[in-house]
């Protein structure tokens, strides 16, 4: 199974992201847009694992959730990773980034002994709106005209998400969730 560790977001945050996504879609000629149900904030992508490896990952998540306390993030500006003529368009976060980076570091440290997991860390926290986007407007112009609402994302738990296809659609399903220490 293909897995990653993420912060799940509320229906309200998903609705806000969907509005921003529709505005991006209006300025795109092509692309693969994220399903509203799949919006999330990735802490660490892992990849293909078996059940035994899943058990180890869950243990690492349990250990990672012992130190951090719940915190808040805020949706911020539109961002992009450019790949040739296509882009990954996303919404970044602000707020308690120090706590988010610490959580990411805890997860990486606790997963570090597993040879299957790449612990190189070039972590840019974001919520992906779409991949392989071909914009009809230059990104900087789009970024200037789009207003991302400053909605609050409470970070109270982390989830192990499975990425799978259901009836041809990509679905991200939580298979394990652990609350951050209070």
Image: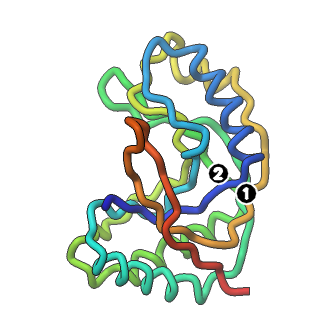
Q: Residues within 10 Å of mark 2 (few under 14, many from 20)?
A: many
Circle 1 SS class:
strand
Q: Which mark is residue 153?
A: 1
Write the residue at 78% across / 39% down. Answer: 149
Write the residue at 49% across / 35% down. Answer: 80
Q: Are marks 2 and 1 in contact (CB under 8 Å)?
A: yes
Q: Which mark is residue 74?
A: none
Q: For the view shown, which residue lies furthest in the left direction?
A: 115
Q: Position of residue 119 (x, y in %)?
A: 32, 70
Q: For the view shown, which residue lies furthest in the front direction?
A: 167
Q: Position of residue 106 (x, y in %)?
A: 48, 80
Quarter-of-image position of residue 2: bottom left
Q: CA distance from mark 2 to mark 1?
A: 9 Å
Say whether residue 67 is left or right of residue 151.
left
In the rendered image of this protein, does residue 62 appear above or below residue 126?
Answer: below
In the rendered image of this protein, does residue 3 appear above or below residue 81?
Answer: below
Say whether residue 149 is left or right of residue 115.
right
The earlier-in-sequence mark between 2 and 1 is 2
Q: Quadrant of the image for the C terminus?
A: bottom right
Which of the pair 164/33 is nearer the observer? 164
Q: Position of residue 79 (x, y in %)?
A: 55, 37
Q: Position of residue 176 (x, y in %)?
A: 51, 72
Which of the pair 90/144 is nearer the observer? 90
Q: Quadrant of the image for the N terminus?
A: bottom left
In the rendered image of this protein, does residue 29 appear above or below residue 94?
Answer: above
Write the residue at 60% across / 88% down. Answer: 67
Write the residue at 34% across / 21% down. Answer: 85
Circle 2 SS class:
strand
Residue under label 2: 93
């Amino acid at each position: 199974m293909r897995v990653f560790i993420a912060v799940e977001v509320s229906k309200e945050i998903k609705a806000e992201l969907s509005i921003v996504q529709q505005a991006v879609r209006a300025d795109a000629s092509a692309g693969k847009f994220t399903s509203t149900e799949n919006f999330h904030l990735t802490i660490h992508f892992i990849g293909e694992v078996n059940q035994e490896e899943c058990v180890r990952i869950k243990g690492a998540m349990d250990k990672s959730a012992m130190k951090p306390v719940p915190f808040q993030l805020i949706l911020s500006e539109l961002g992009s990773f450019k790949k040739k003529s296509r882009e990954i368009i996303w919404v970044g976060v602000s707020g308690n980034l120090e706590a988010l980076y610490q959580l990411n570091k805890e997860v990486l440290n606790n997963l570090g002994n597993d040879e299957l997991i790449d612990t190189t860390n070039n972590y840019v926290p974001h919520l992906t709106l779409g991949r392989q986007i071909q914009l009809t407007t230059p990104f900087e112009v789009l970024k200037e005209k789009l207003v991302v609402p400053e909605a609050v994302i409470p970070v109270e738990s982390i989830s192990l998400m499975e990425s799978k296809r259901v009836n041809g659609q990509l679905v991200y399903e939580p298979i394990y969730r652990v609350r951050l220490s209070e």
